Structure formats: structure tokens, C-alpha cells
Amino acid sequence: MLGMTNGEVVARAQQRVGDVEREAAVERLRDAAGEGRLTLDELDGRLEAALVARTFADLDVLTADLPDTRPATLRPDKESVRLAIRHGKIERVGAWHIPRTVTLELAHAVATLDLRHSPLPADGLRLEVEARHSVIHLLAPAGMLIETDELVRRHSNLTDRRGRRVAEWTGPQVYVTGSLAHCTLKIKRPR
């Protein structure tokens, strides 16, 4: 916000935020907790507020007392990403950077991961799932092999109806591990 006039700061504070800004704030809060700057109770309260934030001012108040220890221009591409939410929704649709490992932690939530429009790492994607009372949608190309043998399911459903019709698996594989409890995992492929 350096170089901004008071009017520009006020105007930005009143502007509405989208999922990208909310997720950036959530990531910053998790990093701060990992560095010991926030207690778990503080983290939970701030995460809930970040997920329902409507303006930049709503988000700024949640991170105002935290130093910015990771300049965006110096961050390398991540090898892994952690997506976690309770009582909400996570979407990675369209083109996005898919790292080697995605950790998905859900409780009473819905997650959609689109694997159709972005390249997977050459050695595949490892999707580590810990979910309770949630729904997961994996949007996959027709010939993508999604291996779920190591996924523990308790009172959960897994569907990949069009996967049975694939004549030949192509490209990098997706390995789904972890556990589902009272969940639904739907693998959706094009008709």
C-alpha cells in the first residue's frame, strides 16, 4: 500500500474480495500459526472470519498484526499445497498450478479440484485426503488414471462411472490416499 493516497487506501478497503484474496489470507494465517505467531484458537477464529470476509478491510484486520515474512516475488513454485476448511467450500477450477502433493483436509465441506486444464507433474499427483462429512469432486480428463486403493473409506461412497469405460489410461496418474468418513468422492469425466 506504499505510494497510495489516503483516498486510494479507503477505496481499496471498501472493495469486495473474491476467493483468491480470501485463500491468500487463509494461507498467511496458517503460516503465522506455523511460525508460532497465533494460537490454535486464534487461528480458528481468524480462519472463520477470513472465509466470510466481504471487503479488503475485513481481511486486513485479520492480518494487521502479522509481519509479511514471504514476499510474493521471492516465492518459488510450491511442491505441495494444503487446502483445509470446515463448514465451507474449496474450489480449484480452470487453470491452476498443480503441485506434486495436495493435502485436502475437510470437515462438513465441499471441495472441487479440476485436473482437466492444468498439467500434472510428470511423476503424478499425490492427493492426501482427510475428510469427514464432506463431498469431493475430482474433475478429470477421460483417460486419467486415479488410483484409490490406498484410500480408507468408512461409511463413504466413491464413484467413477465413466472410469470403467476407459480403453487406455494416458498421462500422469493421481494417487489418492488418506481417509474418508461419511463422505462422497465423485470422479467426474467428460461424456
Image (tube, rainbow, N blue to C red):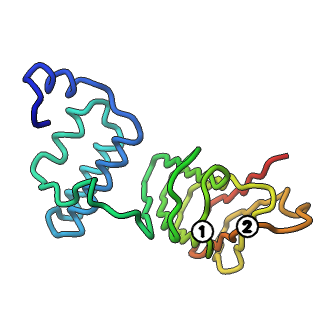
Instruction: Tell me: 20 left or right of 166.
Output: left
| Label 1 Cα crowd, 10 Å radius (few <14 / some 14-19 / many 20+) | many
Amino acid type, mark 1: Leu
Element on which disc 1 rests: strand
> With respect to residue 94, does 185 lie above or below?
below
Instruction: Tell me: 177 left or right of 69.
Output: right
| Label 2 Cα crowd, 10 Å radius (few <14 / some 14-19 / many 20+) | some
Q: Residue 180 carries which label?
A: 1
Whichever of labels 1 and 2 marks the residue nearer the N terminus, that label is 2
| Number of numbered callouts drawn | 2
Residue at x-position 28% and y-position 25%: 15
Quarter containing the N terminus: top left
Q: How far apart are marks 1 and 2 (CA)?
A: 26 Å
Residue at x-position 42% and y-position 59%: 84
Q: Where is residue 26 in the image (x, y as percent from the top left)?
A: 32, 52
Q: Where is residue 81 in the image (x, y as percent from the top left)?
A: 43, 64
Q: Where is residue 93 in the image (x, y as percent from the top left)?
A: 57, 45
Q: Where is residue 162 in the image (x, y as percent from the top left)?
A: 85, 56
